[in-house]
Image (cartoon, rainbow, N blue to C red):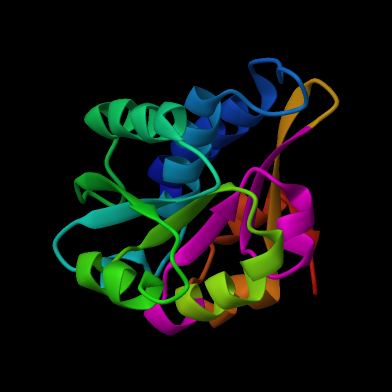
Amino acid sequence: MRGRGAIAACGLLVATLLTGPAVGGNLPAQQQALLLLRTLAYDRNVKGRSGGGVTIVVLTKDGPCGEMKSALVEAAKQLTVGGLQVKVVGIEWSAKEAESRLAAVKPAAAYLCGSFDAVLDEVTAVTRKLSALSFSPNGGDVENGVSIGLVSKGDKAALLVNLPATRSEGAELDSAVLRVAEIVRR
């Protein structure tokens, strides 16, 4: 991103981070969806990893995640990522089938919805192999290998970025997004 477009996009990202209170310690699904799409737009490699469109997988474990999937679908009606249309797909985590099911949809990103603590290493191994940028609403997941955290800090939204993880997943985030993020280097 260059010039005025980068400044405007950075302004939108900052506005998303500064608006809307967190509820019950978690960001509302709509706010997470907007942050996820705007963050993907700052990945210089997203087009190379995406082909003709950007597919985001809502990866579920231990329960439904319809609210987040619906929020992403609604946000994708209004926004594109790097000029590419966004498609949202829900996939239930299964250790035996996860890699093949994810590979079949060629995701640019995977949003972890549910409790992945016991299988987080397996999940991040798959996202790295498939070059899918991983997102989670849990800051602890970011410290343990997920690339991006969409979290609340007090009453504000915050973006956590695990730089080694983003690079392992094939992303190259623009410095504009890194300036407004909290960086994790594990």
Q: Is residue 50 left or right of residue 60?
A: left
| Residue for point 53% across, 40% down | 10
Q: Nearer the viewer, residue 94 or 9?
A: 94
x, y (%) of residue 24? 75, 20
Q: Given the current orientation, which residue lies at the most extreme left position? A: 52
In this rendering, does residue 65 appear at all? yes
Q: Given the current orientation, which residue lies at the most extreme right position? A: 154
| Residue for point 26% across, 55% down | 54
Q: Is residue 77 left or right of residue 181?
A: left
Q: Nearer the viewer, residue 19 or 137?
A: 137
Rendered-image quadrant of the C terminus = bottom right
x, y (%) of residue 35? 52, 38
State the extent of the magenta-drawn residues as a range: 128-152
Q: Is residue 125 left or right of residue 59?
A: right
| Residue for point 76% across, 50% down | 139
Choose top left, top right, bottom left or bottom right for residue 168: bottom right
| Residue for point 71% across, 47% down | 138
x, y (%) of residue 109? 41, 59
Q: Is residue 150 magenta?
A: yes
State whether residue 184 is above or below residue 121: above
In this rendering, does residue 170 appear at all? no
Rendered-image quadrant of the N terminus = bottom left
Q: Is residue 45 magenta?
A: no
Q: How many marks can you see?
A: 0
x, y (%) of residue 67? 44, 26
